[in-house]
Amino acid sequence: MKKVILVMLISCFGTSLLFAQQKPKRQKCSVDMLGFLSKGIDTAKARGVADNYYMWDNGATIVVKFVGGGSPLMRKKVMEFAREWEQYANVKLQFVADNTPATNMRVRLGSGAGHNSYVGTYCNLMPQNTQTMNLDTADFIDYGYYMTQLKARIARKDTVIYSWDPEKFIADIKSKPNIVWAFTSMKGTVLHEFGHALGLLHEQSFPNAIRWNKADSIYEKYEREQGWDKAKVDAQVFEVSDQFYTNGTKYDPKSIMQYAIDASETLNGFSVPRNDVLSPGDKMLISTLYPKGQSVSVKEVPKVSVTNLVKIDVVNGTATKKGISIYPVFDIKSNSKLGQVYYVARLVDEDGYYIKDNDNKFNWGGYVATYVKANLLPNSKLSYNKLSQKNLELFLPYSEIPALNGKKVTIEFTVVLDDIVNGQLDKLMYYSLTKPLSLPR
Ligand SMILES: [Zn+2]
């Protein structure tokens, strides 16, 4: 029997404090909608309860794989918990082998990096070699169990010599062959992240629902507990959505998509406890967005999907045609609503920034670009530039291309949708980049 040497009260107190910080309520999840795009982009887009433009097709089979990591038990639990959504939503989560080449969602299970997911079909904009969701398994450990065990050993004075080191304590737990997991809270986190992956957004962004206390101390708390800077706190916690995205629902503090909120974070003492189960509101919303026994949701909005982007041809001009012509080769399909789309080609410099436009001509969002607008009829399919007769040209005059001083540029091709009827503009439907090119002027 080994002798105990430790500073009991302080270390135990320290531990619980540490775990309070390690595991706030639910480790905050960061939903990254636009973060992967070039740095010049405007990320101040409305968020809300559900982003209808990134819903999967009703009845869709969504192909999901794990990108390495996770014990068989962890994986089994993730699948089991995530599939609870299938009871209410008319979608199927099809988990496939890790080596499946083409999938819709890719889940990393591993220690660290927090929890996050792309929203709905935004996952499809991500390259196949990147993950679309992160589940931080260190957050799933049942720290309460290990603390109780440690305290009992301390009380019995029969434990190992412990000069208190919280990191070592956690590392010890992680190295155990049969870790005790906190499945209840893990289930809440998995449901929350898969909620994002099905198109749901944070409930706390519901307009006028929460009177946030934006004091410095609150920002400091997020910095300390989550490592988030002010901009990230503003985007992930305080952002208020457009009323449109509430889908006519009422604010639901019991939603799985609602963070736990401490009374200190609001001006009126409002608080929300941690929630690990789907609320009646969650079930109702998801079944309205993905109705069973019905082909299309009443909440359907115009959407388009781009497939088979074969290439983006860039052709230099002639003596009479002074400019470059960009010919993306792809198929596009609209849903049951009339959609107004823009095909946009924008220049990106070597450092990943858009290039500022100076003359208000040939620009998109203030950056050098060229675009073509098209109205797509409901339920239509089109192919562009697949025949010898080209049917979509994005032309950029040489005079509009800034001095690049020998540097290469990348051309970003996007399909952006305006939903005029609902007043929702600039919804990104497709995204692709060429390789770096040298452009003549
Ligand atoms: Zn979240």
Image (cartoon, rainbow, N blue to C red):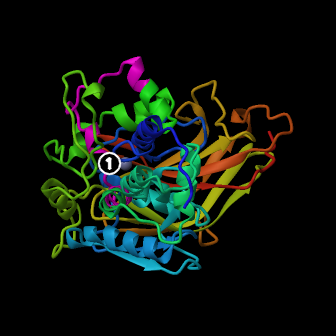
Residue 436 location (% of width, % of height): 76, 51
Depth check, front residue: 231 or 39? 231
Name the quarter where the N terminus is drawn: bottom right
Residue 268 location (% of width, % of height): 19, 22
Asked if residue 122 lies in the magenta stretch, the reply is no
Residue at x-position 73% and y-position 55%: 435
Depth check, front residue: 347 or 43? 43
Depth check, front residue: 20 or 193? 20
Depth check, front residue: 58 or 32? 32
Q: Which residues are magenta?
A: 191-219
- The answer, for residue 95, to whether it is visible in the render is yes
Query: In this rendering, would 301 be left or right of 363?
Result: left
Mark 1: secondary structure: loop
Query: In this rendering, would 260 be left or right of 156?
Result: left
Q: Residue furthest right?
A: 406
Asked if residue 213 lies in the magenta stretch, the reply is yes
- The answer, for residue 110, to whether it is visible in the render is no
Residue 85 location (% of width, % of height): 26, 67
Query: In this rendering, would 46 be left or right of 364?
Result: left
Q: Is mark 1 within 8 Å of ligand 1?
A: yes
**Quadrant of res 189:** bottom left
Name the quarter where the C terminus is drawn: top right
Residue at x-position 35% and y-position 38%: 46
Query: In this rendering, would 249 be left or right of 242?
Result: left
Vertical order, 210 against 306 (above or below): above
Q: Residues within 10 Å of mark 1 (few under 14, many from 20)?
A: many
Residue 398 location (% of width, % of height): 74, 38
Please give the residue where the numbered disc 1 appears in the rendered image.
201
**Quadrant of res 126:** bottom right
Residue at x-position 14% and y-position 47%: 249
Amino acid beneath label 1: Leu
Vertical order, 418 against 216 (above or below): below
